[in-house]
Amino acid sequence: MKLSFHPEVEAALAAGQPVVALESTVITHGLPYPDNVNTAVSMETAVREGGAVPATIAIIKGQIHIGLTGDQLAYLGQQSGDTVRKCSRRDIPLAVAGKENGATTVAGTMILAHYAGIPIFATGGIGGVHRGHPFDVSADLTELSRTPVTVVSSGAKSILDLPATREVLETNGVPVIGYGSDTMAAFFSRSSGLPVDARLDTPEAVAAVIEAHRALNLQHGILVTVPVPEADAFDPEAAEAAIAQATREADEQGVHGPASTPWLLRRVVALTNGRSLRANVALLRHNGRVAGQIAAVLAQLPA
Ligand code: PSU
Ligand code: MN
């Protein structure tokens, strides 16, 4: 399968320069238009500020793209979520063969980033175990157990069962790093109260772990959790109240499967009058910058 590289991304990879992958489900299913396109663009800018080249990954009319042009980003952002397939591992061949538009989730982006030779990826929150649905476990957790890409995120979305998600990560052998924090970040809020495996405070320290992982040829992912910046954090109690209500409503209305995460995120934005959206946008940008910094250090290390 031929990947279509954005020329800037292709040149950076060929020259051993730092590149950070970005997902596209957050654009098509995670945020409302036009915030989604603006956020995608400013996340790319944040990666550059960190010192790396951004490569947003998506499937457009069946073609896998590693790095999008501004026009492609805007095109995807304008599609309604229903017309774009949300692509986790199982969905990628369906979107390609059907010549569909596909937005990659954390799992889908990890797979394609790895094919493209990009070792690090930034996003908002990973999927996890759904509250009250212990068998609705995001394929993101499985992917972290089998694909060697480092995911920089603000933990798992707080709409999930975070203690159960933490347990699955442990079972899957995924190191969880707290970036400047002793606890796993909780998406809109700075702390889940759950312990991390290591607290690391600098891009150099994280890059050293990624390098050791690479040298040992360990074939799984690493999760770096970065707390949302203090000024944009969402009060944990207000967040929890909105999440609890949204979860109850989703159960009442029978929302489940892949529709669950997008539905809950949209509902929480409405219930918090957009305050959760502000935290979401801020953490995406911040994570892009941190991932760019880590990628820049990593690219300096001898291969
Ligand atoms: N975080 C967000 N918005 C999102 C997602 C995460 O702030 O839209 C997406 C990611 O792409 C993640 C996916 O991989 O939700 C998880 O969906 P599921 O639980 O169906 O695997
Ligand atoms: Mn699911």
Image: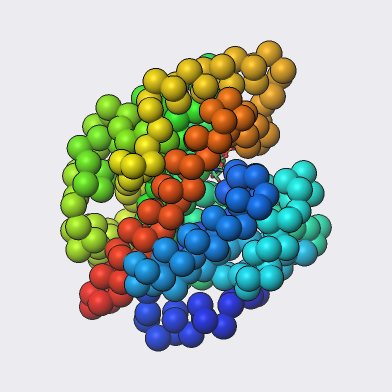
92, 285: nearer the viewer: 285
Residue displayed at 65% across by 45% down:
32
Residue 66 position in % (x across, y down): 57, 70
Using the image, determine if residue 52 lies above or below residue 40: below
Left or right of 144 in this view: 299 = left
Residue 231 position in % (x across, y down): 33, 42
Residue displayed at 31% across by 71% down:
296
Using the image, determine if residue 273 lies above or below residue 214: above
Q: Which picture quadrant has residue 250?
A: top right
Residue 100 position in % (x across, y down): 78, 58
Left or right of 263 in this view: 141 = left
Residue 149 visible in the current orientation? no
Using the image, determine if residue 223 lies above or below residue 76: above
Name the quadrant of the N terminus: bottom right
Residue displayed at 51% across by 23% down:
243
Left or right of 216 in this view: 239 = right
Residue displayed at 49% across by 65% down:
44
Name the quadrant of the C terminus: bottom left
Q: Which picture quadrant has residue 249?
A: top right
Q: Colour scheme of this structure image?
A: rainbow
Residue 266 visible in the current orientation? yes
Residue 82 position in % (x across, y down): 77, 44
14, 184: nearer the viewer: 184
Using the image, determine if residue 11 lies above or below residue 175: below
Q: Count the labels in the image.
A: 0
